[in-house]
Amino acid sequence: MGMDDKMALSRRAFLTSACCVAAAPLMTSMTLAAAPGDKRLVTIILRGAMDGLHLVQPYADTAFKLYRPTLAATPDNGLIDLDGFYGLNAYARDLLPLWKRGELSFVQSVSTPYRDARSHFDGQDVLENGGVNVGEEKTGWLNRALSTIPSVHSRKAIDVNTSAELVLSGDNDVEVWSPRTDLAMKSDEKSFFERLYRNDPQFARAMADAAVTDFSADELYADDKRGAKAVDVARLAAGMLMQDYRIASFSITGWDTHAGQNAAFKAPAAELTTAILTIRDTLSPAVWKDTIVVAITEFGRTVRENGSFGTDHGTGGLAVIAGGGIDGGKVIGKWPGLSEANLLNGRDLMPTGDVRELAAAMLYRQFDISPDSLTNSIFPGLDFDRSSVYLRSV
């Protein structure tokens, strides 16, 4: 590596530090990666264990209301009927046009191989590392996928947090992007950087630029100031997908609804709804047709509501698929039923599908990654082939 390359790398690290000192605590994290072709994939990680039984409610299962006397709804009291068995939570009602156009599906009763301990940190680790056990893989499945996409010439990724989310961490390079225009550094932090680089004109210039520019994203936002909400990150991600990038990943938090779930669910459900619709609206119709959005969570929540009118950490959960080219308008997956005998450990929705298989199917569909690569290097131990129900369903 020559001196110019080292300077460029160091300058990038500096900008990363300057950007993230102030922004990281407030941001929804996002990563982007480059890949060839016209297909796009957006992965949204729903951190906190999204209650899929609350977003898409199996109101026609007679046991559901018994387990959730205050949380369960019906089409008679606000639930939006989807197919005579499942209903959509009213907080996500703006997704209904996508459902009716066949651009939205839900995947019921899925989970990672993670079981029993129900730790957010461990559950998210398995969700993002793509293996079977906590810590089994030190890199993320989406990063490993970049190495197997045919004809990839550029494998760089961009992360808006202080470090890459695990799902896109690995051997393929990760750079940093901030979704905020303002650095809002404290005066002592700004003085530190100014003193550190005062004798280096190039770094001094970079520091000045970092304080007054929005990192070449003006064309994505026009006169709107960028922010840290999911809608801002979704708009940024979609804008980048309209340019050179083909893979994006970001998170939506706030799903840990242990108490007062009916009220607590509103904000994250609205953010997820807005993020999906923002991606759709920001992309051109032709690009939206070649894009798939997948929203996944570390695990589901208990079938029974608790004494605080919320739900606790569970196992089986829900995934969301959206895109202009999918065969949607359906709830995918085998419903296990809610009888006592069919619950996992007498408390959780029984998983009937592996969320890794869903992710593998989307990678296969979008980027033609071979089944061998999907089951060996990307999702070790996964049973996947071209007959996957998730390929037949989208």
Image (cartoon, rainbow, N blue to C red):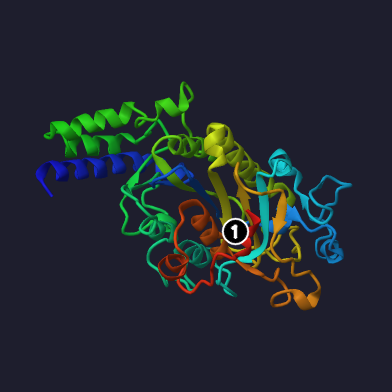
Give me the residue at 53% from left, 59% from top: 359
x, y (%) of residue 327?
66, 49
Compared to residue 373, the image places residue 178 above or below, namely above
Compare residues 242 and 164 and report the one nearer the observer: 242
Compared to residue 327, the image places residue 193 above or below, namely above
Number of labels in the image equals 1
x, y (%) of residue 313?
64, 65
Q: Is 152 on the left or on the right of 367, as rendered?
A: left
Give me the residue at 35% from left, 36% from top: 185
Residue 288 occupies quadrant: top right
Give me the residue at 40% from left, 68% from top: 377
- Among all residues in the image, which is located at the extreme top? 223
Callout 1: SS: helix
Residue 158 occupies quadrant: top left
Compare residues 392 and 322 and report the one nearer the observer: 392
x, y (%) of residue 194?
21, 34
Residue 331 occupies quadrant: bottom right
**Three-letter code, disc 1:** Leu
Other residues around mark 1 within 10 Å, as few (<14) / some (14–19) / many (≥20) = some
The reply to whether residue 259 is in sight is: no
The reply to whether residue 125 is in sight is: yes
For label 1, the residue is 391
